Image (tube, rainbow, N blue to C red):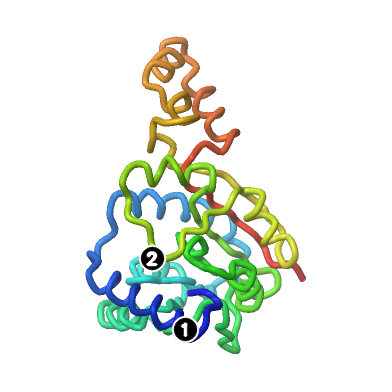
Amino acid sequence: MSSLGESELSTHRAYYNEFWGNHAVAPDSAEVERLAEILLEFSYAMDHLAPHGQRPRICDFGCGRGWLSAEFARFGDVTGVDLSSEGVRLAAERWPHIRFVAADLTRWRPGETFDLVVSSEVIEHVEDQAAFVATLGQVVRPGGYVILTTPTARAKQAYFGLGWEPQPIEAWLSSAQLKGLFARDFRVLRHRTYFFDFAHTGIYRLSNSGKLKRAFKALGLRHLYEGLQRNFDLGVTQIILARRKG
């Protein structure tokens, strides 16, 4: 999952083999909400993905157990790729109509390009994030699109304060860092955050205040309150829609 030495890469692969081998198949409520946000960005790009009447070529980059690949198979021809050979094996058993590949995401060069690459909650678990984005630039065609979700660095302390277990690498990015990684090969079309009401410490104690929400609602200004949350990137997760230059 990152540009690591072979020993470290094997350790990471073993971790994710166990992780995906023990994971439930069906998406949980947070993943369903994430899917809705991804599909919203997909709706902005879908008319430009492939010639009329043709199914776009889609890559699920860091597919894990393959549930997102299965969702996107409704819209195009999907290839799922992940470091975990066990995740890929299980995904191929569950969805045999989809192609799944086991590979290091920072070095994968498949010899083909895709109209759309979707990468959901992956880049924060990668050591060499520049190499990760460089690979995105290699596998999406010029003029093609990338939809990527990842947590925001601002929310990291509050998130893990809730008791979540960290994965081997937790390199969360600020919005500026994420946009900077994409600047060379992509034009960022849209960026926003979501999952707002997740913590009540620090700045989130104010932004997710129940009293404040009720006050804005009583004044008929709930839309203003939600707009402020979006404008100040106060969600735990950021989502980006970018188009490959060239």
Q: Which one is in front, 127 or 237?
A: 127
The answer to which image quadrant residue 16 occupies is: bottom left
Residue 148 drawn at (x, y percent): 53, 59
Q: Is mark 1 on a helix, strand or loop?
A: loop
Q: Which one is in front, 106 or 68?
A: 106
Query: For this view, does 67 lie left or right of residue 106?
Result: left
Residue 25 in the image: above or below residue 200: below
Between disc 1 and disc 2, the foreground one is 1
Q: Quadrant of the C terminus?
A: bottom right
Mark 1–mark 2 distance (CA, rounded to whole Å): 18 Å
Residue 134 in the image: above or below residue 119: below
**Which comes before the other along the chain, label 1 or label 2?**
2
Residue 171 in the image: above or below residue 130: above
Residue 82 drawn at (x, y percent): 43, 77
Query: For this view, does 186 lie left or right of residue 110?
Result: right
The residue pinned by badge 2 equals 68
Question: Residue at coordinates 27% horizontally, 54% vertically from top-left?
Answer: 28
Number of numbered callouts drawn: 2
Q: What element carries label 2?
A: helix
Residue 147 drawn at (x, y percent): 55, 60
The residue pinned by badge 1 equals 103
